[in-house]
Amino acid sequence: MNMRPEYRLLLDCARTKLSKNNQDKIRELVNDDMDWDYLLQISKAHGLAPLLYYHLHRIDHNHRIPQPIIDQLHTIYYSNLAHNILLSNELNKILNSFEKKEIPVVVLRGLALAQTVYKNIALRATTDIDLLVQKKDLSRVIRALLELKFRPLQGGLITKEYSTELCFVKQLVSREKYFSAVYVDVHQDITSSIRLKRIIKIDTQGVIRRAHPTRIENVNMLVMAPEDLLLHLTLRHCFERLIRLCDLTEVIKLKKSELNWQSLVQKVKESRIAGIMYYTLWYARQFLEAPVPEYVLKELTPNWCRKSMLDALLSKAVYSDDSNSLSRGRKYFLQILMSDRLIDVFLVLWTVMFPSSEWLSYYYGRPRAKKLYLYHLINLFVTLLSGARDTLRISSKKSNSG
């Protein structure tokens, strides 16, 4: 890919540890005429500003980076650290409460990755706390969160069993009267995308059963087995933000001796997401030097016809260095295109076009769901149309520049 130097620099910093080769490339790029404002912009868009600061301020011994840029990255880094400390404190309370009530729970994504994979909670930008629980434990989970002063975002939804994601919030007040909020998302499966629920069936009990116990800050927690974690991260990242690709790469590097690649390939094929996993792993190896075995990619490679079409489109439109192009529509459009079977494409489209009335009420925050169908279809059509337009625009622009 023909990349701007700012994007190449961001990729070299998108890791917890720098090799000698990475350090040399960063120093070489810093010596060039760098558009620092643009670098700051795309680092924030891709969720990599904390990692960018972590590496740049250690490697810039000759002070070639403008001080205002370093100052802004410094602010982002320490603001993220403060936010994650706040989240960690609340997570510890939740985990202690769940342990006393004997509720098995797996901590998902951001905070779990920051603590167990990045090994430094300042490096991974995190917005909320994500928990995976079994459906049979949902009522006890809700009562435990209510006891800890969390409140549901949508009134009345906590009694419904249809939803695979329930959202809670807790308002905190500091000594300086500064208000902040902690959000908790409770999941019943690791396939949080409504677009994929019709084609992917995940055994939540199996995921929790295979999870490994670990102890962080004197608190017991469960983290997913490496294969389940890679599957979860693949379903989440949607080819839009590099932080998701960085998550997956860091897990592969950390767990490479434990990873059962053949088991992962089998799960991926059973879940009918081989195409999504193939391109995710390919980009992780291509961009971030993830140690993905060649035979794994060969087993997941789409057929020649599909691969030719997807290569032509995806290679120009994913992980764009144009931060303004990170549209929700493009994410949806690409993910639907990459469903393994044609019938799955129709199943995904049917799911997002005609979700349950309860889901519509929950998603749009309005009580009269039946009247929302037309609004939902118009919104979906506009979203997918804009996604197709963005994808083709980026592909056309990069083809012309190439």
Image (cartoon, rainbow, N blue to C red):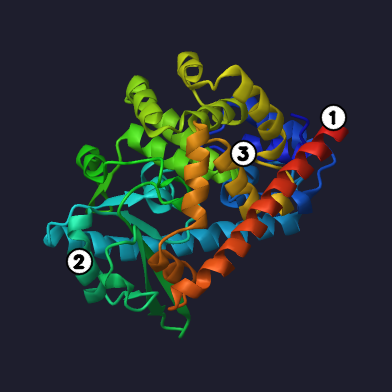
* Mark drawn on residue 88: none
* Mark drawn on residue 13: 3
Badge 2 amino acid: Ser
Q: In the shown orientation, is residue 10 left or right of residue 335? A: right
Q: Where is residue 389 in the image (x, y as percent from the top left)?
A: 74, 48
- With respect to residue 183, does 206 lie above or below? above
Residue 166 visible in image: yes
> What residue do we see at 46% from left, 14% from top?
295
Badge 1 amino acid: Gly
User: Alpha-carbon distance for marks 3 and 2?
Assistant: 43 Å
Asked if marks 1 and 2 touch (Cβ < 8 Å), the reply is: no
What is the secondary structure assignment of the residue under circle 3? helix
Labels 3 and 1: the sequence-earlier one: 3
* Mark drawn on residue 139: 2
User: Alpha-carbon distance for marks 3 and 1?
Assistant: 25 Å
What is the secondary structure assignment of the residue under circle 2? helix
Badge 3 amino acid: Cys
What is the secondary structure assignment of the residue under circle 1? loop
Q: In the shown orientation, is residue 109 left or right of residue 80? A: left
Number of residues whose C-alpha sits closer than 10 Å to that of mark 1, classed few (under 14), some (14–19) or many (20 or more) = few
> What residue do we see at 81% from left, 47% from top?
35
* Mark drawn on residue 402: 1
- With respect to residue 257, does 168 lie above or below? below
Q: Where is residue 189 in the image (x, y as percent from the top left)?
A: 32, 49
Number of residues whose C-alpha sits closer than 10 Å to that of mark 3, classed few (under 14), some (14–19) or many (20 or more) = many
